[in-house]
Image (tube, rainbow, N blue to C red):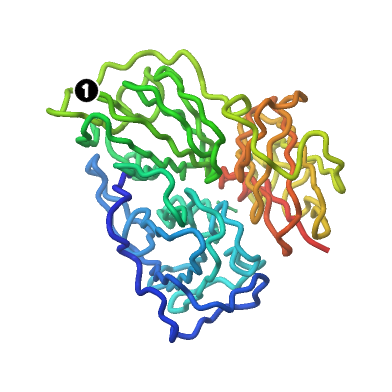
Amino acid sequence: RMSGGSGPHDHRQHHSNHQADTVEVAALTGDLSDPADVKFELVAQRKKISLASGAVVDAWTYNGEIAPELRVKHGDMVEVKLINRDLDSGVTIHWHGYNVPNAMDGVPGMTQNIVKPGQSFTYKFRAAQEGTYWLHSHQQASEQVGKGLFGTLIVEPAQETEVYDEQLTVINHRWETDQGYKKAFGSHDDWQRKRVAPGKTVKLRIVNAHNHSEKYLLQGTDFRIASIDGMRIQDPQPLSDQTAFRLGSGGRYDVIFTMPDHPVFFKLGDSQRESSPGILFYTDSPPEKPVLRAETAEFDPSDYGKPVANDVTAASRFDREFLMILGNEMGFYNGNFHFLWTINGEVYPKVPTFVVKEGDRVKTTFVNKSLTEHPMHLHGHHMTVLKKNGEKVKTPWLTDTLNVMPGESYEVAFIADNPGMWMDHCHNLDHAATGMVLHLMYD
Ligand code: C2O
Ligand code: CU
């Protein structure tokens, strides 16, 4: 779905209410004693949703919508009350990529109890990072995220240094319907049209909520990738409009461009897949379908912009080094014979836990020896990518979800600065459901 992101804060309940309803926050690790600056309510509920293709899906939603947006300011104390109205199953909210205190991380059985029908749970955290994030249920996530239990979390800078005339959030998801998979943002001929005057600046926040990586094209103008996984790129260079970019499952890119005096189009898939949905930005009269040019390059974050200033570099001394060999084999899981997705030859919960101490510099090496890509997601921390296939990357970048393609290896590092028990798993949620999960624990 594509939604305008600059509208009013529909889900915002009230501001700076110091006599807030009692906060049923469980054990807290961060300092959450300050009153909330902003409050939201997300009601988990069933809803029949009509897609642009005409298919109707029996969705599970927060607030009866596909991807409600929570928009706050950097520095806000945020409180979100989750109410499970009528789902058959328990739910939670995980703040994907957002480094919240452990008790707020939304992992049932680990950081909180599941929120059953009729129950509620209040999340509270300080919005300490700006950028594009998302939220989703972490209970049987492959099923619940598939059904629609997700939304976006947009944290604006406290003081705007760059102002965009247009901001759009694009969340990419596929629905399983009786007619097969449907794109969340429409059927084959579903091109959303948007009028933008020449010279205006546009920011597209792209979230991949689908289980596989997706390729995108933005044609008609040069553009820049301003952020990866909510983290700003220093000095992002313009990319030609024949550069495709790929976003792994769970990942986010912020893309910016200045509207030229002719149409610009953003689409899912490559130029060969003309039927995929997209957005047409036009200046006067809406154009017909765009003529797509073949892509000639693919965006590579390992050589883009300037390296981020960071506490860890390839030359750092590490207190802990972990290896994660990503594999697959056939076997039994929960009594069924199917593909197992393994870490170091084991499936969860047999994969040994990684143990760190607060303050450690931690290096993890991912090696993908399996048949398919694995978007590796670490909760509660951002990872700095240092090496790819054994070579130092030119521009280390920060990520919370690193898409590791078959045959690839990466070295990433993070500072153990957020105590608790965290998940580190593949964000192809089907892979996570059949083994590709481990725990990171602070001792
Ligand atoms: Cu977006 Cu553990 O997940
Ligand atoms: Cu995977």
Which residue is rendered at x = 63% and y = 27% of the image?
Answer: 302
Q: Is residue 30 left or right of residue 152?
A: right
The quarter of the picture where residue 179 lies is top left
The percent position of residue 410, horizontal first and vertical second, equals 72, 32
Is disc 1's CB within 8 Å of ligand 1? no
Q: Which residue carries the number 1 mark?
A: 289
Which residue is rendered at x = 28% and y = 39% of the image?
Answer: 186
Residue 178 shows in the view? no
Q: Say which element carries label 1.
A: loop
The percent position of residue 156, horizontal first and vertical second, equals 44, 53
Asked if residue 311 is positioned above or below residue 98 in the image, the reply reads above
Q: Is residue 229 left or right of residue 317?
A: left
The percent position of residue 320, horizontal first and vertical second, equals 85, 47
Q: How many marks?
A: 1
Which residue is rendered at x = 67% and y = 33% of the image?
Answer: 396
Residue sitting nearer the eye, 273 or 152? 152
- Residue count near mark 1 (Cα–Cα under 10 Å), binned few <14, some 14–19, many ≥20: few
The quarter in which the N terminus is drawn is top left
The percent position of residue 285, horizontal first and vertical second, equals 12, 28
Q: Is residue 440 left or right of residue 52?
A: right
Q: Residue furthest left?
A: 285
Residue sitting nearer the eye, 112 or 267? 267
Q: Amino acid at mark 1?
A: Lys
Residue 359 shows in the view? yes
